[in-house]
Amino acid sequence: METLVYQFEGGSRGLPAQPQVVGVVGSGNLEVLIEAVPLAGACSIEIKTAAVGFGATWEAVMRDFHERWQLKNARIAINDMGATPAVVSLRLDQAVETILGGAA
C-alpha cells in the first residue's frame, strides 16, 4: 500500500456540512469520502492505494479534478484497489455531485 497526499489552494466552491461516501473498495475500484472541514480555504486529498509507484499519474488526476471543481475547505479520502485514472475521475465527480445534491 502507498499513501499519497495532495493539497490545493485557491478554490472557490464550498461544500455542505454532511459528508458523503461513494464507491466500493474492491478489485479495480475505489471508495471516496468527501467532507467539509476548515482548511483555510484548501482542498486536501489523501489516497491509499494498492497500485504503488503511480504518484505522477495520481497527481495529474487530482490536479485536473481540482481545476474542474475548485473546492475549498474540503477533505477527500480515497481508498483505491487499482482503479484506472478514468474511473478515479468519474468517482470523484460522483462524490462532488452527490454532496452538492446534484447541483453541480
Image (tube, rainbow, N blue to C red):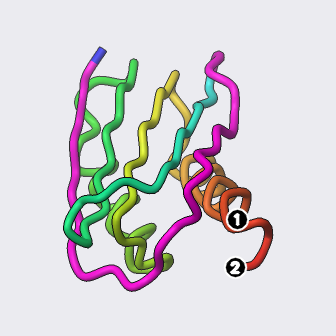
Q: Where the N terminus falls, by quadrant?
A: top left
Residue at image position (55%, 39%) is: 32
Q: Identify which residue, 36 or 4, lies in the foreground.
A: 36
Could you say which quadrant of the image residue 9 lies in? bottom left
Q: Tell whether 98 sits left or right of 32.
A: right
Rendering coords of residue 23 (x, y %):
69, 35
Residue at image position (38%, 50%) is: 75
Callout 2 amino acid: Ala
Q: Tell whether 40 sits left or right of 25.
A: left
Circle 1 sits in a helix, a strand or a loop, which is it?
A: helix
Callout 1 amino acid: Glu
Q: Tell whether 60 sits left or right of 34.
A: left
Provide the residue span drawn in magenta: 2-27
Q: Identify which residue, 98 or 60, lies in the foreground.
A: 98
Rendering coords of residue 84 (x, y %):
54, 42
Q: Is residue 24 magenta?
A: yes
Circle 2 sits in a helix, a strand or a loop, which is it?
A: loop
Residue that mark 2 sits on: 104
How many labels were placed on the picture? 2
Labelled pair 1, 2 in contact (Cβ < 8 Å)? yes
Separation of disc 1 and disc 2 at Cα?
6 Å
Q: Is residue 14 magenta?
A: yes
Local packing at callout 2 (Cα closer than 10 Å; few below 14, some 14-19, many 20+) is few
Residue at image position (31%, 39%) is: 46
Rendering coords of residue 97 (x, y %):
70, 65
Is residue 48 shown above or below 35? Answer: above
Rendering coords of residue 86 (x, y %):
59, 54
Residue that mark 1 sits on: 97
Q: Tell whether 50 sits left or right of 99.
A: left
